[in-house]
Image (cartoon, grey):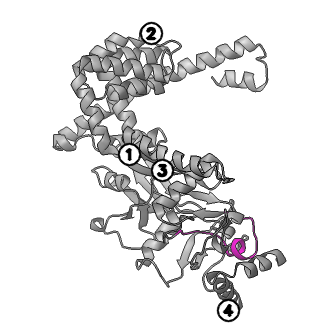
Amino acid sequence: MTDRAELIDRAELTDRAELIDQLRALEDLKSAVAGAQARITVAFDAAQRSAESDLGVPVAEQGRGVGAQIALARRESPARGSRLLGLAKALVTEMPRTLAALDTGQLNEWRATLLVKETACLAAEDRCAVDEELAADTGIFDGAGDRAIIAAALTAAYRRDPRSVTQRASHAATERHVSLRPAPDTMTYLTALLPVAQGVAVHAALSRHADTLRPAGDTRSRGQIMADALVERTTGTPAGICGVEVQLVMTDRTLFQGDSEPARLPGYGIVPAGWARTMLAGNHQAGQHRDLKVWLRRLFTAPGSGELVGVDSRARFFPAGLRRFIQARDDTCRTPYCDAPIRHFDHIVPRHGGGPTSLSNGAGLCEACNHTKELNGWAARTGMGRRHVFDIRTPTGHRYQSTAPPLPGAHPKATDEPGIDLPGAQLAGASQSGGHRRWLRAQAKALKYGRAIELRTRLNAA
């Protein structure tokens, strides 16, 4: 594979047919690797359960944490690791024909996942029968798209056990929920999983509203009207601002001097500096003025490393200052490859193990990762690094390192070496002169009381 890559880099493969053949061969290889990973995953799960059985672990608790270990090994999130474990078990133990198709490249991992997902409600013997009926390794799905594969699996599953398929459809309504995830360019995807009748009704109501306003001369597009109506009807205000705290993290230069260093919005990610300033100063969008209450809280970082070392103690919204500090430092769950929101503020070294309740021994974790960390065989300890670091050890002895993400303004080549003061690094006390603090307070007061014009004038002058 390395030799082939070098040939391609040197442009020695110029025949177009040869290049397409290589793409197809690599795709087949990816499918075969996925099949091998499934077998290895099942073997590891069996070995883990056997070892725990020898230790006297109850059957109901055996195998906990296996999905998390698989996720770390495959550089995936813990939730994805659990799904990969379930996929592997289904393929190896109940769907051998689908696994054979994966081995030969007649199915890729995603389409094998679709077959497993659409037969999940069946008993083991019925799932095996559907696997035999569809026989993906015979090429029955050659040229078929995702929808065709889903339809075939659903039809076969319903023939085998219509009652289970019907019960699955009824149970799906209990899984309705609303989720939010980042989208490019400071946008978000607000997604609602609803029963089909309710989902169609919501969409129809928004559509009728848009169809009423457009003929009346509204210049917004149909999609814009529907989106604005959804926000207004949900929050009760046209602009959608309903008393939710938005914790923008940025440097003072970005806020007051027009610097281009981007800001960070917890729960979303990196946002442009100009967008952050406009958001705080008051945004005139679609003729609507957003009257925001703005509070400033200073965060102090160490010279060189960018390590967060202090925060203003005048907590206004949350009395737990240490939690606020960890939230600002960690942003999302600190488990490698997990981007879930922080739900638990965890002791890295547990309290029962002598770990102190301190900043260095604290980390933000999601609920699932915190529970996994407490399983037998898992351990964590603090470490040394440019920013806050701790090490995770799994039951197999593998180690993974978690480093706090850089704050806005941190230099990409920051070091811990003494005497190096990179641009933007500020330390509480020494670098905060009385005059600078007074200047910050004056700027904060102007921003707090909505003096947007004055703020923009100072930014232009800078």
Query: Which comes sooner in the sequence, label 2 or label 3?
Result: 2
Q: Which residue is denoted by mark 1 in the rendering?
A: 397
Residue 291 position, x and y percent, is 60, 75
Query: Which comes sooner in the sequence, label 1 or label 2?
Result: 2
Residue 185 versus residue 455 in the image, above or below: above
Residue type at tag 2: Ile
Around disc 4, counting alpha carbons within 10 Å, would you say few (fewer than 14), some (14 to 19), or many (20 or more)? few
Q: CA distance from mark 3 to mark 4?
A: 41 Å
Q: Residue at x 27, y 66 (%)?
A: 352
Q: CA distance from mark 1 to mark 4?
A: 51 Å
- Of the two numbered discs 3 and 1 in the rendering, the one whose residue sits closer to the viewer: 3
Q: Residue at x 42, y 44 (%)?
A: 201
Q: CA distance from mark 1 to mark 2?
A: 44 Å
Verify CB contact (< 8 Å) between mark 2 and mark 3.
no
Query: Which comes sooner in the sequence, label 1 or label 4?
Result: 1
Q: CA distance from mark 2 to mark 3?
A: 40 Å
Residue 237 versus residue 43 in the image, above or below: below
Residue 13 in view, yes or no: yes
Q: CA distance from mark 4 to mark 2?
A: 76 Å
Residue 375 position, x and y percent, is 28, 51
Which residues make up the magenta segment? 246-262
Verify CB contact (< 8 Å) between mark 1 and mark 2.
no
Residue 394 versus residue 299 in the image, above or below: above
Residue type at tag 1: Gly
Dominant secondary structure of the magenta stretch?
A: loop
Q: Is residue 264 left or right of residue 234?
A: right
Q: Which residue is denoted by mark 2 in the rendering?
A: 140
Residue 46 versus residue 159 in the image, above or below: below
Q: Residue at x 72, y 25 (%)?
A: 6
Q: Which residue is denoted by mark 3 in the rendering?
A: 336
